[in-house]
Amino acid sequence: MKDITAFAKIPLGLFPTPIHKLENISRLLGTNVYIKRDDLTGIGLGGNKVRKLEYLLAEAKAKGAEVVFTTGGAQSNHAMLTAACAKRLGMTPILILKKRGVTERKGNQLLEYLMDTDVRFMDTDDYEDIYREMDRVGTELGKPYYKIPCGGSNALGALGYVDCVREIRQQADRMQLSFRHIVCAEGSGGTHAGLYLGTRLYMQETTVHGMMVDTDPFDQITSEIINGTIGLLGLDMKIRPEDLHLRDMCGPGYAIASEEGNAAIRMMAENEGLFLDPVYTGKAFAGLIAMAKEGAFAPQENVLYIYSGGAGGLFAVDMKL
Ligand SMILES: Cc1ncc(COP(=O)(O)O)c(C=O)c1O
């Protein structure tokens, strides 16, 4: 196996992020629920993408890129954080976003405006159209450029969450406890992919549950990313789509608030003073609540919820409360 520390990484975030118990929610659910504060990764409004971008932007720098392209929906947290991180590193971010969701100057659009980011919209549902447009714009600019896929979810980006599991393992050892379950939101697959592989390497007793907030075939997508990362690390293993634990929490559609997600946001706000978002973290936490109610977690087991950020979306998406 290639040592993960051998991969170039640019420090962008503040790590380790804290882990603490959600005392009130644990009491309400009858389950020991802990939270990994990846909303506090230290740049932008925090969030999971920083861990991926430390690897992706290191590769961009190594390749001499001056311009960094990425994509997502109009309120993509990933796109906003890519702009923040690229700016910090002196590179020019260009965001070519799907014209889907809230395009007005609200939420992440406002933050991108404050960072004076070049944001363009394309009226398409196909990311391939957008990747072609990146090549067209990059060639026209005549500057070296680097393309980051939607969500930063590829084999290299997923290393960020393999590394996160190493971090969790060290924290758990220090706290003298173990996490039997990890729960995360699943929007483009990279976070789950890294967590899955990380647990196979560093926390074999742990099951990762991906809470799907979109309708894509995440069993295929995520296992492909994992197998790509396995290739990068030179590991002798292969993951099948059916090895993953996924739950559909999308509700009425991607980036459309769901009743369960709204209830989870309220539960977290009322009991713990933390604010989840309607697109990712609220729906993912609703999945954790549903599993607890179904008796999926034994009373002595500890569950770790990955709070992956997303505050920008809370101020843009209509929750219809
Ligand atoms: C706040 C937040 N949480 C979770 C996710 C899901 O992570 P991933 O895209 O790696 O599946 C995203 C992005 O998609 C996000 O912005």
Image (tube, rainbow, N blue to C red):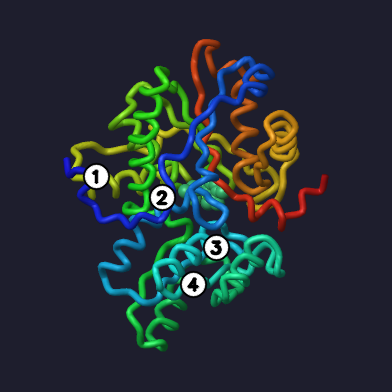
Residue bearing the label numbered 3: 80
Who's the residue at 17% across and 40% down the image?
1
Check residue 233 in the rendering and tell me which mark sits there, or answer none.
none
If you read the primary sequence from the N terminus, does the residue marked by circle 3 or circle 4 appear first?
A: 3
If you read the primary sequence from the N terminus, does the residue marked by circle 2 or circle 1 appear first?
A: 1
**Rendered view: 104 above or below 162:** below
- Specify few, some or many for label 4: CA neighbours under 10 Å numbering under 14, 14-19, or 20 or more: many
Residue 36: x and y in percent read 50, 35
Distance from the alpha carbon under mark 2 to that under mark 1: 13 Å
Residue bearing the label numbered 4: 130
Tell me the SS state at disc 1.
Answer: helix
Q: Amino acid at mark 1?
A: Ile
Tell me the SS state at disc 3.
Answer: helix
Residue bearing the label numbered 1: 4
Q: Amino acid at mark 2?
A: Arg
If you read the primary sequence from the N terminus, does the residue marked by circle 2 or circle 4 appear first?
A: 2
Q: Amino acid at mark 4?
A: Ile
Mark 3 vs mark 4, foreground winner is 3
